Amino acid sequence: MIFAGISPVVRAQDGASIVGVVTSAETGEPLPGAHVFVGFTMVGTVTDAGGRYELLRVPTGSHKLWASIIGFETTSQEVAVADTAGLVFDFVLPTSVIEIGEVIVEAKRDRRWRKRLETFERMFIGETPHAGQTRLLNPEVLDFDATWLGSFTASAAGPLQIENRALGYRLQYFLKEFEREGGTIRYDGDPLFEELAPTSPEEDALWEDNRRVAFEGSLRHLLLTLWRRRTREEGFELHRIPSVDDINRSDRRFPVDPDELLVPAGVPNQRLLAFSGLIEITYLPENEEPEYLLWQSGSPHRPLRPQRSWIRLTDGPTEIDENGEIIDPYGVTVYGYFAYERMANEVPKEYRPGGK
């Protein structure tokens, strides 16, 4: 997920409104039935017969606004929401040159494609227990390229439809880029979340409990506690480590004052995450899952301990917003538990345990 350029600013307290029109770049005609949504949230709608849309209760923070309809190129624009007001934003969509039908036929006949699909699902959806209850409903839109040197890329002819029965969400994920180079995975895209209807009160309660556990101890949870100066109170313990090579050396771990990691960014509702080396994050309230040991080393035999992750800045200080959103996610590399939890453990950016 890459955000760049100058963002229009909307002001909102209980949520902003964003309105606009979606039209065809080729004909100038409005496009009814186009999906418009705010990435990584549950805020989305469909354009009316005149191509018009209205989004309500858009949370404060930095977002990517998307417009999509079959036959046209999916388009996105960055927007930063600050206080109360509304924003008018129109989309002009170019005609798509991707023939989805041809991709579907080819994918169904290609055994190599199927093996690469399995690889992609492990890397993208993940290998946590929640991944076993998360299904990619339309894999035929995907295409892959891989080399014996370890490079692997994926592209999608349309939004990925994902059903997560562990957390109770259906997602449309708009994948712009997916690449694995050696042991590093990076991808760019945004999902729209929709809540599933539970089949019973017990399932509803289970989903809420699973969502809380998925959120607590996550990278977003950490960044929110840094923003609110509540890192220690919410169970995080931070140390600085000079390099990846020093991860397992106790004599190379130095306590970090969490309040020193965020500095003013010069932009409303944003701050800079700034540090050198690596930051080791231990989340004391939750232990590792047994599956994490298998994912990490292939061996489940050492005792489980509190979840531990590491982050480093890829290219110097990087901006975050008050929602715990990294403005340029490629600016941060994650290791350990943060790297283990993938799309199957994602909740919308506006989610807070108990609605807080």
Image (tube, helix red, strand yellow):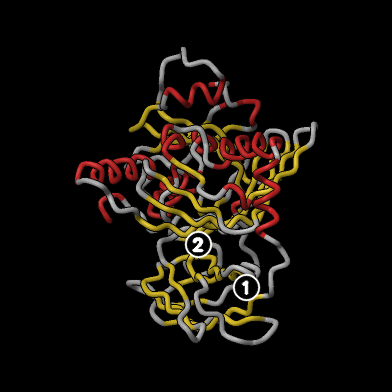
Q: CB under 8 Å between callouts 1 and 2?
A: no
Report the Cα–Cα distance between label 1 and label 2: 18 Å
Judged from the image, the secondary structure of the residue bearing numbered disc 1 is loop
According to the picture, the residue beneath numbered tag 2 turns out to be 39
Q: Which mark is residue 24?
A: none
Q: Residue furthest top?
A: 301
Using residue 23 as the reference point, say whether residue 16 is left or right of it.
Answer: left
Identify the image quadrant of residue 48: bottom left
Residue occupying the point 46% across, 37% down: 131
Which callout, 1 or 2, points at the residue further toward the start of the chain? Answer: 1
Q: Indicate the position of residue 167 as horizontal and vertical percent values.
A: 36, 45
The amino acid type of the residue labelled 2 equals Gly
The amino acid type of the residue labelled 1 equals Ile
Using residue 116 as the reference point, say whether residue 239 is left or right of it.
Answer: left
Using residue 272 as the reference point, say whether residue 142 is left or right of it.
Answer: right
Judged from the image, the secondary structure of the residue bearing numbered disc 2 is loop
Q: Is residue 294 visible?
A: yes
> Could you classify mark 1 by the number of other residues whose Cα lies within 10 Å: few (under 14), some (14-19), or many (20 or more)?
few
According to the picture, the residue beneath numbered tag 1 turns out to be 6
> Could you classify mark 2 by the number of other residues whose Cα lies within 10 Å: few (under 14), some (14-19), or many (20 or more)?
many
Identify the image quadrant of residue 26: bottom right
Compared to 7, does 213 lie above or below?
above
Compared to 277, does 8 lie above or below?
below
Q: Indicate the position of residue 148 as horizontal and vertical percent values.
A: 79, 31
Quarter of the image with the C terminus is bottom left
Residue occupying the point 39% across, 49% down: 225
